[in-house]
Image (tube, coloured by chain):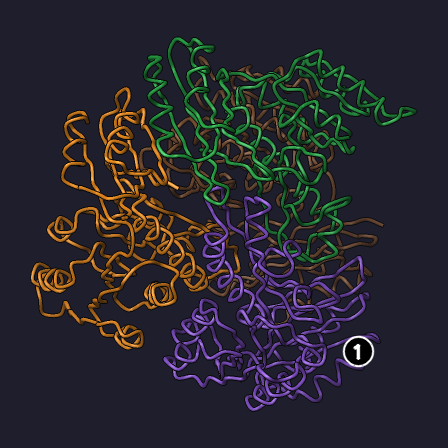
Chain colours: A brown, B purple, C orange, D green
Amino acid sequence: MQRKILLTDCPDAKGLIATITNICAKHQLNIIKNNEFVDNNHGRFFMRTELEGIFNDETLLADLDSALPTGSHRRLVAAGRKRIVVMVTKEAHCLGDLLMKSTYGDMNIEICAVIGNYDVLQKLTEKFDIPFHLVSHESLSRPEHEAKIIDTINQYQPDYVVLAKYMRILTPDFVAEFQERIINIHHSFLPAFIGAQPYRQAYERGVKIIGATAHFVTNDLDEGPIVEQHVINVDHTYGADDMARAGRDVEKTVLTRALQQVIDEKVFVYGNRTVVFR
Amino acid sequence: MQRKILLTDCPDAKGLIATITNICAKHQLNIIKNNEFVDNNHGRFFMRTELEGIFNDETLLADLDSALPTGSHRRLVAAGRKRIVVMVTKEAHCLGDLLMKSTYGDMNIEICAVIGNYDVLQKLTEKFDIPFHLVSHESLSRPEHEAKIIDTINQYQPDYVVLAKYMRILTPDFVAEFQERIINIHHSFLPAFIGAQPYRQAYERGVKIIGATAHFVTNDLDEGPIVEQHVINVDHTYGADDMARAGRDVEKTVLTRALQQVIDEKVFVYGNRTVVFR
Amino acid sequence: MQRKILLTDCPDAKGLIATITNICAKHQLNIIKNNEFVDNNHGRFFMRTELEGIFNDETLLADLDSALPTGSHRRLVAAGRKRIVVMVTKEAHCLGDLLMKSTYGDMNIEICAVIGNYDVLQKLTEKFDIPFHLVSHESLSRPEHEAKIIDTINQYQPDYVVLAKYMRILTPDFVAEFQERIINIHHSFLPAFIGAQPYRQAYERGVKIIGATAHFVTNDLDEGPIVEQHVINVDHTYGADDMARAGRDVEKTVLTRALQQVIDEKVFVYGNRTVVFR
Amino acid sequence: MQRKILLTDCPDAKGLIATITNICAKHQLNIIKNNEFVDNNHGRFFMRTELEGIFNDETLLADLDSALPTGSHRRLVAAGRKRIVVMVTKEAHCLGDLLMKSTYGDMNIEICAVIGNYDVLQKLTEKFDIPFHLVSHESLSRPEHEAKIIDTINQYQPDYVVLAKYMRILTPDFVAEFQERIINIHHSFLPAFIGAQPYRQAYERGVKIIGATAHFVTNDLDEGPIVEQHVINVDHTYGADDMARAGRDVEKTVLTRALQQVIDEKVFVYGNRTVVFR
């Protein structure tokens, strides 16, 4: 008995739920949990089906392909622990939370490696017996630097790449290499305060809430489909540094909540938006 | 073309989604939106199916009854405006919000009537051209008082009865008359501060959050399955009166959010718990 | 015995608290509540002192003026009910909440009049026995239209003007007429989604939180010092209309919370920022 | 030049602010930040004054003592890094967050030692080069066990003792030893779900919010003056384990927020309540 997750998204049509569930029944797979959503604005159907049984992936997918409308995507992934590579620069809080949660059973991930463009977080990473790769960007062109990172990542064949406060812009080529598999934490409630020093910007603007956004990375570091956002209240007594400090707690919480949804295979990306099932 | 909502809850079993969606397909009903949930602790399956088409209720329900396991409940209700009777005592804020929202199109309800055990809110109700019934409890036994209220409610045949700060305990007989159809707002984040003067209790305990709970009424006014809860932060500068004032905003928000879910037929009750679909 | 509030803001200097409290003591005024804040980035001191006693405003202010450093502002205002004029366009929810709260004792304001550029909300206003002035902008230039509004407002000599979803841009002349006395509700968590149709923008961006901002009006309708902000969570099931509906509850809550702080004379404005004491 | 914090609480009286600030001025101390609060229900005045200058503690306190009313407390404490001993049982998340924050500069604390009644968290503690003391309760009476813990704590002379999911009840003797210096995290929004297995209780009750409470420890582990509380939304898809997992993020956030206030000397305790200045 295995557990797998079937993720289907396709043009909306009549009878899709019956079609898919009948195929699952024919394959004697038990539906443990099922979610659907239809985006009526875009006429698109999304369904996540958690299945238990003995799988013949090939025939199951073939049956689906012949039954689903043109323009359908479907994916069958094993439930369970996911392999993660984390990219960092100098800030410790998001990495620390991921290390704690993977070590103490709060997230079903294996952190295969941490890659930093500085060595600041090497010691922290190695405390948790995880390999740290220093891939400095110094005296390298951006494509050269990214090529080295891609090589390092590909040694580990991770399911997802997590940017845990990695502070360099990624090129379209890098993003294309890990399509819909890179999750970033942005230190603002996007789309406010795009760009550098968002807490400074927030302070100058005199806002009463600050927040963070976890999103898939597309070709613009601050854009990309949003998975999770959260804010906290601040007031006039917060300087920019106080906002940054308070913000770090929000950042790590938002990043790990988003990653949890992603590794549970609950997130669909379409265009610049996401469906995040519960 | 009509729109109706099919609500099914039954012992969990293999193939239920396929079974139900196949019956819908056989009846040429289009599924607009579908949600399911399985409570694995209690082995119970819940499904809400929003359907569009031409309905033959009798044969549809008969088909379901012969296909579903023993111990199943199913209900087919028309989508659209619901009829509401509101019960009040003296506080205006929840009633006011319901009147505003029904008048200005923010909730798809018809407030058929307001019943008060005092006349304090008669003027407010009548501003909105809605009948107000004063049913004083004075010099009446509780059963006599409730009998008069039940008579008044039944004139209107409402879908739901909303206790918008109705401050009297209801008897089991009253509750039985409107089984799973009475929604109450409790001025606390239950199960804290059950009973009288919750804001005074909250103040005395020195809490840093206060909240409100909307729930279906069962035989204990402060118990019953919770539909919605929300809290706000308070601090040492809040006296009990300040908490009460801040709390009134939370109360009305929580009550109308809960009622919205209820009139959209998104809420299942089982035991002391609810499933609230999105 | 009267109660007044002394609001002082001035360049920071040693001994300011002692200076001010000694003057209050000399005048035999009892300090009921006191708050101070120093903005170290701008070297500015803010103090709100709630006083009780018999006031000789002239000598008290003269004593302060001779003791405080150059560049000081001080204001002595009576505590208690404030006079408000509300400006609206077509949306009822913020006005409705203000009418309910002023009528039922939840806000210590007198709504002297409501001014609309459409007559949509006349009926609602008059239900609460408050004069409604239709000042249509049709066939008027912007200065002509605003001149008529200013005349109408000035009939009532209000303490504050509240824009309760007034959907027209105000000119610098209008704003100058009521300097730091106009409060607006913006249907977004500024600075995100400035401009028209913020809920549509939010939907298109696929955000997971939406919010509202109450701020003083300066020469840009969407800018101005922020008094209060609040957000709620949304998800992929929310269309732009659902976001707007959910947002309306946030808008009215944020507006009335902000107005409460303002009428309690707890808000200092400086530059584009505010100090909001508790 | 030093920075110290003067904490005064006393029966309310006229002129207290002037009295205290005049004494500070006489000692040529500059007030960096000042907060006051009067609890009118209990007639008690609280003031926190952050001072800079050259201190003669003895004469400053003597001046205050002769000027303040009978029943006053005043405390003068150095600003800056505080010494902390952490007590744990088996759960890692709160300890991990404290270790990360103290190591990476997010909290101005020195964790002198960690004491556990199991050795589960020894490895984690020692990763961060902090001494871990296993003080098992096995085959010891409660007084014997606590005596050993008290001895261990007293080796380090900490400012505060933090119970980071220490799961044993403390005796009045232990509490008396560290009066108003023990901070606990309770895995519920008190006063709901006192006692064992609060997430199980919360699940059974079907609540829609769960939370955590940080409080000073008095003679009842689940009581004591509340410093900070926070909640998150849950829904029917959360089992008791999911609630516990989501709750752990809230617990660590609430505990560190509370501790931050405490080490900044912003918290006054009186009776079962706190004043927490900003």
Q: Position of residue B191 (x, y in %)?
A: 67, 56
Quarter of the C terminus of chain C within the rendering: top left
Left or right: residue A133 versus residue B233 is right
Q: Of helix, strand and loop, which one carries label 1?
A: helix
Q: Position of residue C55 (x, y in %)?
A: 21, 43
Q: Position of residue A238 (x, y in %)?
A: 40, 32
Amino acid type of the residue that numbered disc 1 sits on in the rendered structure? Ala
Front residue of C170 and B114: B114
- Residue B275: which quarter of the image? bottom right
Instruction: Classify 10 Å Cα crowding around label 1: few (below 14), some (14-19), many (20 and above).
Output: some
Residue A26 is at least partly visible in this image:
yes
Q: From the image, tell me which residue sits under label 1.
A: B67
Q: Residue at x 48, y 39 (%)?
A: A212
Q: Chain of mark 1?
A: B
Q: Is residue D203 above or below residue B77?
A: above
Q: Residue at x 58, y 81 (%)?
A: B137
Left or right: residue D15 versus residue D239 is left
- Residue A95: which quarter of the image? top right
Front residue of A85 and C149: C149
- Residue A254: which quarter of the image? top right
Q: Residue at x 82, y 61 (%)?
A: A28
Residue A156 is at least partly visible in this image:
no
Left or right: residue C254 versus residue B220 is left
